[in-house]
Image (tube, helix red, strand yellow):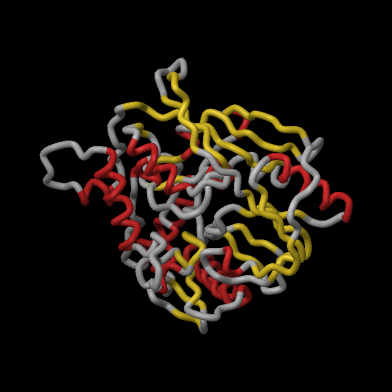
Amino acid sequence: MKWFVELLENIPLAPLTTIRIGGPARYFVEARDVGEVQAAVAFTRSRDLPLFVLGGGSNLVVADAGWPGLMLKIAIPGIDQRGAHDEHGNVVFDVGAGESWDKFVSRSVMARCAGIECLSGIPGSVGGTPVQNVGAYGQEVSDTISSVQVVDLRDGQVRELCREACGFSYRASIFNTSDRGRFIVLRVSYALTPEGKPHISYGDLKRHFAGRETMPNLAETREAVRHIRALKGMLIVAGDADCLSAGSFFKNPALSEEQHEDLKQRAAARGLTVPSYPALETHRKVSAAWLVERSGFAKGYGMGRAGISSKHALAIVNRGGATAAEVLALKDQIQHRVEEIWGVRLEPEPVMVGF
């Protein structure tokens, strides 16, 4: 095990997040291999310090007081394409947890391998994708993940978890539910389809390619997704105020039949119809964005230095100098109003650190 690792103190965390909010970390380590990860973990145990693992900082809100323990940034590099196909004929890519997710998507598309093209433009690092079971436009990473290499904090050992062991469901896995805080993701293996066709099932993509006579290829699909995300302020673009966000702030709620019927009756009383999206119906989910906008929170809504993106109703943005307290106050206001009007409790999607 590598015992030497560069240990930094009182490092500002706001610049390491896409929403640009949060206080400092008492200690900070950037780990580029498993030895440095294990050394950082050993340090926290020797000092009895809380540990938080940081990826790309794209799905994160850090408290104004910061983090009192050690912030461990995983920067393990590498995108390795195995020479042979697996038993299902897929091409397997082994990717370091510190790699940019969109860089990997680009590499897979250039290799003409299908399976994650609709996940283009999502900020953050590869290591965060299995934790949240990242998904968009009809694809989820759990569709292609074959295994996840982790450090098990119970005994410090490196383990390989198969896809089934990860317990994937909508925006969830064992990493953020039953075994939250137990594992640190080191590498992720993805099984992609060579020469596969792009996944064009989502309404936005269908509309983008409407009228086209030929099937778009993977590269065209990737560019279409990035274009659609940019229109919604969900693509990181320098100078765009709508990009200072933690992404979608609320998950699409899953309702029981009784809850869904109640929602439809509340909507009908207001002369409205709850929109139906096939991609959500498979999970018995309704649109969080529809609920937010129909509760008085239009795109561009502001509350001090925090607000809602002018392009996407689910993105809470930092309008300049916002604090975590201001963001959470707006979050609370939205949740309260939606529950009051629609009887639905919205669940936040970003990870809250230091609260």
Residue 331 location, quadrant: bottom right
Is 67 positioned to the left or the right of 133 in the image? right
Relative to 113, does residue 13 appear above or below in the rendering? below
Relative to 64, does residue 177 appear above or below in the rendering? above
Residue displayed at 63% across by 76% down: 325
Is 124 positioned to the left or the right of 154 in the image? left
Depth check, front residue: 190 or 249: 190
- Where does residue 222 sit, x and y in percent of width and height? 31, 46
Assign the C terminus to one quadrant of the image: bottom right
- Where does residue 227 sit, x and y in percent of width and height? 29, 56
Residue 240 location, quadrant: bottom left
- Where does residue 56 sit, x and y in percent of width and height? 55, 55
Residue 289 location, quadrant: bottom left
- Where does residue 344 sit, x and y in percent of width and height? 52, 59
Assign the N terminus to one quadrant of the image: top right
The answer, for residue 23, to whether it is visible in the render is: yes
Is 220 positioned to the left or the right of 92 in the image? left
Is 39 positioned to the left or the right of 103 in the image? right
Depth check, front residue: 77 or 162: 77
Q: Residue furthest top?
A: 87
Residue displayed at 33% across by 38% down: 110
Q: Residue furthest bottom?
A: 304
Q: How many marks?
A: 0
The answer, for residue 347, to whether it is visible in the render is: no
